[in-house]
Image: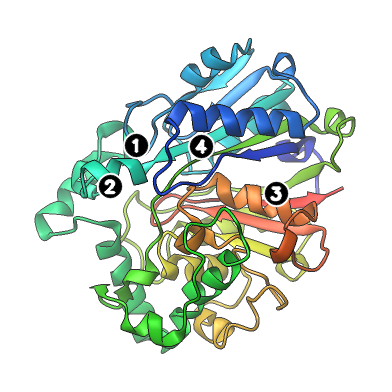
């Protein structure tokens, strides 16, 4: 595989994460500073070393709980002097800041990029239960143009769209509620060992099946958990990352493709952007899905995790139900440990970078009680419907 691919010149040198509150007493900026300073210190750097900054969706509509702090704001509070900043919305969803930051480093614009993602939806929902409804979306958030075709038909939440995918998966492949349940059950079992997780009480199959049906066949426990949190990642030029205190975690391959119309339902109700993303990712590396030692896959709704497993080739298309049945294969001691921090279903909706943070935590052996067997290759993916990106991580 060619070494000229831009991501192969970039590594993760440090990670940080604020408290994960539901809600937090700290402001969005305080959470952002907490995560950023922790990540910079973890990389063995100082604020003076950081010469790039990025996040998603950037500085659009700051104050919205979906994106309360953007790069310009955090840059000024931290007193950073940057040569590059990524402050735009456009990109493949929650991992856009990481993709753009890696490109900036590979292009020689900067050496160390602080990538962060802050969200305060738990606080917002205390004031307004509809704060995260699709009917409240803004132009700078997810392209409101498209929602005009959905909201007149009572699509007021992402679950109404994802329920269509789940129902079609059930119909075409014989997937069952008990199989789908293994995603939230696995996440809850892992969250019980994560001191930051929002929900740490035990969940049984009976608990899952008894939970309220929200949009058939998706239940309450199939939905992610709003929280207040910030996550930060320091990307460094690969040769410089070798000078830090941590074994560099290389960006082996990135997937960010979108070969279909920007919509949730125009191609197939069993295929979303993750299939385009997966094909791109594996075309950029000699590694194979069988090499992956842990997987942190987007679980905004549990069906998305199953579609990501199929899209990334971690199991055959249509067979994710059989793959997760019983939960053994995706448990911490299984063939493919999944969402080891509890994911967004129980750990909290840190929305994108939380998956990268946990992948690095596992690769560096920092998982504590939830640590899985030592491994060198992990995958993180985020996004649903028409937005998606993934990154294959390899520890040096």
Residue, far left: 152
What residue is disc 4 on? Answer: 117
Give the structural element (helix, strand or loop) at label 2.
Answer: loop
- Residue 5 in the image, given as x and y percentages of width and height: 74, 40
Numbered mark located on residue 65 in the image:
1
Left or right placement of residue 3 versus residue 7 in this view: right
- Residue 130 in the image, given as x and y percentages of width and height: 20, 48
Task: Classify 10 Å Cα crowding around label 3: few (below 14), some (14-19), many (20 and above).
Answer: many
Task: Classify 10 Å Cα crowding around label 4: few (below 14), some (14-19), many (20 and above).
Answer: many
Instruction: Give the number of the mark in front: 3 or 4.
Output: 4
Q: Quadrant of residue 297?
A: bottom right
What residue is disc 3 on? Answer: 253
Report the Cα–Cα distance between label 2 and label 1.
8 Å
What residue is disc 2 on? Answer: 132
Left or right placement of residue 221 versus residue 149 in this view: right
Of the residues under marks 3 and 4, which one precedes in the sequence? 4
- Residue 362 in the image, given as x and y percentages of width and height: 73, 57
Residue, far front: 25
């Amino acid at each position: 595989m060619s070494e000229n691919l831009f991501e192969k010149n970039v590594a993760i040198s440090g990670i940080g994460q604020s408290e994960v509150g539901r809600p937090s007493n700290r402001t969005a900026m305080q959470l952002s500073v907490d995560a950023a300073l922790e990540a910079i210190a973890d990389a063995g750097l100082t604020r003076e070393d950081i010469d790039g900054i990025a996040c998603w969706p950037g500085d659009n509509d700051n104050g919205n709980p979906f994106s309360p702090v953007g790069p310009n704001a955090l840059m000024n509070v931290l007193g950073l002097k940057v040569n590059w900043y990524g402050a735009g919305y456009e990109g493949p969803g929650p991992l856009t800041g990481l993709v753009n930051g890696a490109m900036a480093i590979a292009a020689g614009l900067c050496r160390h990029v602080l990538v962060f993602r802050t969200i305060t939806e738990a606080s917002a929902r205390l004031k307004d239960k509809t704060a995260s409804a699709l009917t409240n979306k803004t132009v700078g958030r997810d392209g409101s143009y498209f929602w005009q075709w959905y909201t007149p038909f009572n699509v007021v939440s992402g679950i109404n769209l994802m329920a269509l995918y789940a129902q079609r998966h059930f119909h075409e492949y014989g997937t069952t509620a008990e199989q789908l349940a293994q995603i939230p059950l696995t996440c809850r079992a892992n969250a019980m060992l994560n001191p930051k997780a929002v929900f740490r009480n035990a969940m049984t199959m009976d608990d899952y099946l008894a939970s309220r049906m929200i949009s058939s066949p998706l239940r309450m426990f199939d939905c992610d958990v709003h929280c207040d949190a910030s996550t930060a990642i320091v990307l460094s030029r690969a040769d410089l990352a070798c000078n830090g205190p941590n074994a560099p975690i290389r960006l082996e391959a990135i997937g960010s493709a979108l070969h279909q119309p920007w919509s949730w339902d125009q191609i197939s109700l069993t295929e979303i952007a993750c299939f385009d993303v997966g094909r791109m990712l594996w075309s950029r590396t000699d590694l194979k899905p069988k090499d992956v030692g842990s997987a942190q896959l987007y679980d905004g709704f549990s069906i998305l995790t199953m579609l990501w497993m199929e899209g990334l080739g971690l199991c055959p298309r249509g067979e994710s139900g059989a793959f997760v049945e019983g939960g053994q294969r995706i448990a911490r001691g299984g063939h493919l440990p999944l969402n080891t921090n509890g994911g967004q279903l129980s750990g909290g909706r840190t929305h994108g970078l939380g998956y990268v943070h946990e992948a690095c935590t596992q690769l560096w052996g920092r998982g504590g009680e939830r640590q899985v067997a030592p491994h060198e290759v992990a995958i993180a993916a985020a996004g649903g419907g028409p937005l998606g990106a993934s990154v294959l991580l390899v520890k040096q």
